Image: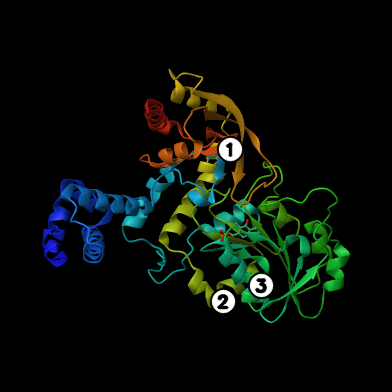
Amino acid sequence: MNKNRLSALPQIEVLVQNNIIEKYIQPLSRPLVTETARSVINKLRISILNDGIHVPPLDEIVNLLEHELSILEKNRLQRVINGTGVIVHTNMGRSPILHDVWREVESINCGYSSLELNLDTGKRGKRKGLIPKLLSTLLKCEDALVVNNNAAAVLLILETFARNKEVIVSRGEQVQIGGGFRIPEILEQSGARLVEVGTTNITKAEDYVRALSEDTAIILSVHRSNFAIRGFTSSPTLAELSDIKPEGVVLCVDQGSGVMDEDLPGETSVRTHLSDGADLVCFSGDKVFGGPQAGIIAGKREFIEKLEHHPLMRVFRPGKTVYSLLESILVKKMNGEQTAVTEKLGRTVEYMREIGETIIAGINPEDISIVESTYTTGGGTAPDESFPALSIRLNLKEQPHCILKRLRDAHPPIIGTISNDMVHLNLATINDTDTGHVRAELRKILEK
Ligand SMILES: *Cc1c(COP(=O)(O)O)cnc(C)c1O
């Protein structure tokens, strides 16, 4: 009878104590390992009762369970090595944070902090520390504000100034950025009415003038973060928009990337938008700006104050981790220090060659070699630009997608790309501290 066979199944506790399975308790927690063991045994029980299979030997059951646990472990957030050559990669946490910055804010985060405490009066203070002062000094504007991300920044601006009113946006800027952030939809969400002007390729200042009405609350200019329009195109400058803008209308730029200086082709800096007459400019904290996930809004004080007093601000406010990281990064930036992004942007091809040669030293150049390639800034910046880089190219018999998978199975995983049917690891984004690990994994692949 099938039922009698069930008694041969191992007990959950016995499975969890197995040396192979036990190793997963630390990364996954004992309750999750136990739960997974229970579900594996349950599935077996059903197969035994329904399909009459025999109870597999213990090591087979352990293998089954380990397979499930290893899938769960892969789902845990973990460090990866970015070999894609995309510096700000949304799938890989966008901008890294420099170790120096992280260490500096550790004690603020691991202890109590003055997040909302005025140390002068001893009373409740404002949750923003020095950030508005630092940002307004850096950006030459009156005031600034931080929320959880740039999507929240855009929504807060629309909710505050444009609910039941009109927002003018060019047809060339009705964009979708990444997963699910669509300008027309976020406008609808805020209760603002979208007034489209111009065409996909050409929008003129007169188009905006014609669209103005008593109900106009905002003229919104949105950076085309992830695509470029080339050929017969034109749109008014921000200075022109500032000229035609009537009193009481807010001229707002969703700048996106947080580029501060004019050193990236295809990008206009936050500071330039502000000096050209934008009332508010918003951008992400974790793109080229080089900080943690945040949305930063900079501009005129009268508008920033209105934003601060909107009830949604309570929903969108970040916590101490974001404030402390931003504060530290801003001070360092203003003292001329690097961020993780500027460090990578400043990387020379010679430096990439050094890293590459360390990785492939002694390996047959017919199998693995260094080739010319390009890197991109990514994360909604300079969508049409790429810059010279070097890549490690694997010229092996094994299928490229199988090699990519093996590289992803490494600890920490290594993320490469396929081009011309060969796996490439771009040296613009691989750190010199990871050369040993990458080398070891490549050797393993070669040995196979
Ligand atoms: C990236 C981006 C956003 C969304 O910012 P998040 O910080 O991801 O919320 C919005 N607008 C523009 C122009 C962007 O580039």
**Distance (Cα) linking label 1 and label 2:** 38 Å
The answer to whether residue 318 of the structure is visible from this angle is yes
Number of other residues with Cα within 10 Å of mark 1, as a class: few under 14, some 14 to 19, many 20 or more: some
**Front residue of 421 and 227:** 421
Q: Which residue is mark 1?
A: 345
Q: Residue 46 — which label?
A: none
Quarter in which the N terminus is drawn: bottom left
Left or right position of 96 against 384: left
Marks 3,2: beta carbons within 8 A: no
What is the three-letter code of the residue carrying label 2?
A: His
Number of other residues with Cα within 10 Å of mark 3, as a class: few under 14, some 14 to 19, many 20 or more: many
Q: Which residue is mark 2?
A: 310
Q: Quadrant of ligand 1?
A: bottom right
Q: Residue at x 51, y 48 (%)?
A: 95
Q: Position of residue 344 (x, y in %)?
A: 54, 37
Q: Which residue is mark 3?
A: 187
Quarter in which the C terminus is drawn: top left
Going from N to C along the chain, the mark reached first, 1 or 2, is 2
Q: Marks 3 and 1: which is nearer the front?
A: 3
What is the three-letter code of the residue carrying label 3?
A: Leu
Left or right position of 262 against 146: right
**Front residue of 415 and 3:** 3
- Ligand 1 neighbours mark 2 (CB distance < 8 Å): no
Going from N to C along the chain, the mark reached first, 3 or 2, is 3
Q: Residue at x 15, y 59 (%)?
A: 9
